[in-house]
Amino acid sequence: MGYLTIGCFASLTGSMNYDFLLRLSKAAQRKGHRVSIWFSGNGSSSIKKGQKILKDYSHGEKHLRELISNGVEICVCESCAYARGIMKEDVIEGAKWSAMHWFLSKIYEADRVLLIGGE
Amino acid sequence: MKTGDVKLAFIVTKLPYKSETSRLAITHALSYQTVEVLLEDNQTITPSLIFVDEGVLNCIKNHKSMEHYELTSVETHLKNALLVEMDIYVCKESIEKFGVLPERIVNAEDIGAEKSIKIVSKDEIKEIIKRADHLLYF
């Protein structure tokens, strides 16, 4: 099985890029691939817990929790999160909190790398 | 376990300041300076930054972002990248398209960098991309 590392720079709402990331990650994980996801830029606010599910908006928390419980590694950029007023204690349980070199270290191991989003 | 060097090509196509995308490309590339704490001794990462299309507008010198936005400039990040000897390339055809003269491209001589941004053709960029293990498109 392969190892997929994904960098997500898309915001939770505003485009369907984030939804694509969630579906792709689930599909890869279900097929037995190892998956790591790095949230940076506007993607970093999507790891905040306490998201309300409104049918008119994309939502990430439920899906991220499912991915984490299935072994997908998730990490948020601490500087990007701080800049958006998100503290470590605000982050969904099981998500990691680190600096950009975490993403590079996962790229090192990866068979494939994808970047999603970024306006 | 994988060993050796992994080459990353950060391709930057976005304007500076309109979004944070180009800044994130540079700061992610710069983080190779500290990635060794997460890698083994025989594992290294070598990034290169490649500016094409509108992305070349990041490389014009004399940014005033601190004055106008109270933000560290993209130029400062580029200078830091040169100081740590990262390879930075700017597309010749793209700067010509925007009328940017080579003397307007950022350099870091004032902070003691020996490297400078290289102006290269699209064909040369294709070769750099071919040598990369992974592309990161910003």
Image (cartoon, rainbow, N blue to C red):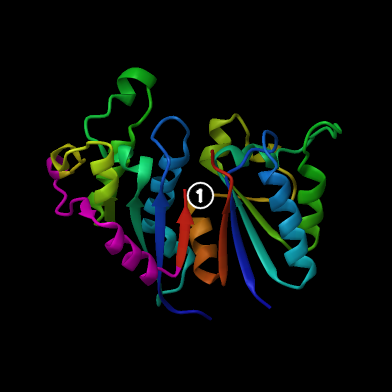
Count the numbered circles shown: 1
Residue B94 found in image quarter: top left
Q: State the residue in front, B127 or B32.
A: B127
Q: State the residue in front, A108 or A90.
A: A108
Label 1 element class:
loop
- Compared to residue A87, the image places residue B115 above or below, namely below
Residue B122 found in image quarter: bottom left
Where residue B39 sits in the image (x, y, percent)? 47, 68
Q: Residue furthest top?
A: B68
Can residue B86 be seen from the camera position used here? no
- Compared to residue B74, the image places residue A76 above or below, namely below
| Residue found 59% across the figure and 37% down from its top | A42
Q: Give left or right: position of A14 versus A62.
A: left
Residue B126 sits inside the magenta stretch: yes
- Neighbor class of circle 1 (other Cα within 10 Å; few <14, some 14-19, many 20+) is many
Residue A84 found in image quarter: top right
Q: State the residue in front, B18 or B26.
A: B18
Q: Chain of mark 1?
A: A
| Residue found 22% across the figure and 30% down from its top | B62
Can you identify the residue that label 1 sits on?
A99
Q: State the residue in front, A90 or A66.
A: A66
| Residue found 78% across the figure and 43% down from its top | A61
Q: Amino acid at mark 1?
A: Ala
Q: Give left or right: position of B22 versus B93.
A: right
Q: Which residues are magenta?
A: B109-133
Where residue B114 sits in the image (x, y, percent)? 14, 53
Q: Give left or right: position of B130 versus A24.
A: left
- Compared to residue A31, the image places residue A9 above or below, namely above
Residue A51 sits inside the magenta stretch: no
Where residue B4 sits in the image (x, y, percent)? 40, 78
